[in-house]
Amino acid sequence: MPTFLSGPLNTGQTTGGAGASTANATSTTVLRGRITAVYIKYNGSPPAGTTDVTIATLGTSPSPPANTILTLTNAATDGWFYPRHQIHDEAGGGVTYDGTNEVYEAPTIFDKVKVTIAGANDADSADVWLLLE
């Protein structure tokens, strides 16, 4: 299956005061596919002790519920992240390596994506790339 990198989607510069600034941005197009990885680059000097980044769908196309793809709490280190969502948890469905019946996969989307940064300092931002297949 073809893989492509979408981004960067920049949150915009934060406002609101030291350790309490926020900003968000939404993709201009609908993204579709399986999100195999997310790269986040922090800009400025967001404090690692308070900065949160949330990546979620809007829930608008074609009217699916909004879905959180990834949330990073109290973090400010650039890097690759590999979101996985639980898709199956039925007794008797087979036991996984950790002794549960849970099955996880990369999230699938068909929607616009909203990226939010919160708890940062003024003029901070984050760039987000989504690796989709």
Image: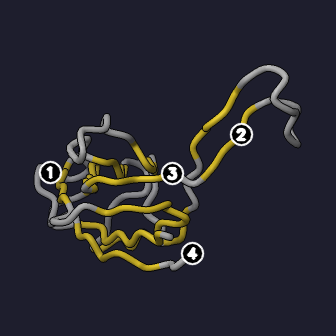
Residue named by callout 4: 1
Q: CA distance from mark 2 to mark 3?
A: 12 Å
The answer to whether marks 3 and 4 mark residues whose Cβ atoms lie closer than 8 Å is no
Residue named by callout 1: 17
Name, please, the residue furthest toward the top: 91
Q: Earlier in the sequence, mark 1 or mark 2?
A: 1
| Mark 1 element type | loop
Residue named by callout 2: 103
Q: Quadrant of the image for the N terminus?
A: bottom right
Q: What is the number of the mark on residue 107?
A: 3
Q: What is the number of the mark on residue 47?
A: none
Mark 1: amino acid: Gly
Q: Position of residue 129 (x, y in %)?
A: 38, 72
Within 10 angstroms of label 4, few (less than 14), some, or many (20 or more) residues?
Answer: few
The answer to whether marks 2 and 3 mark residues whose Cβ atoms lie closer than 8 Å is no
Relative to 132, say whether 17 is above or below: above
Mark 4: amino acid: Met
Picture residue at 86% right of the left edge, 33% below the top: 94
Q: Is residue 131 visible?
A: yes
The answer to whether marks 3 and 1 mark residues whose Cβ atoms lie closer than 8 Å is no
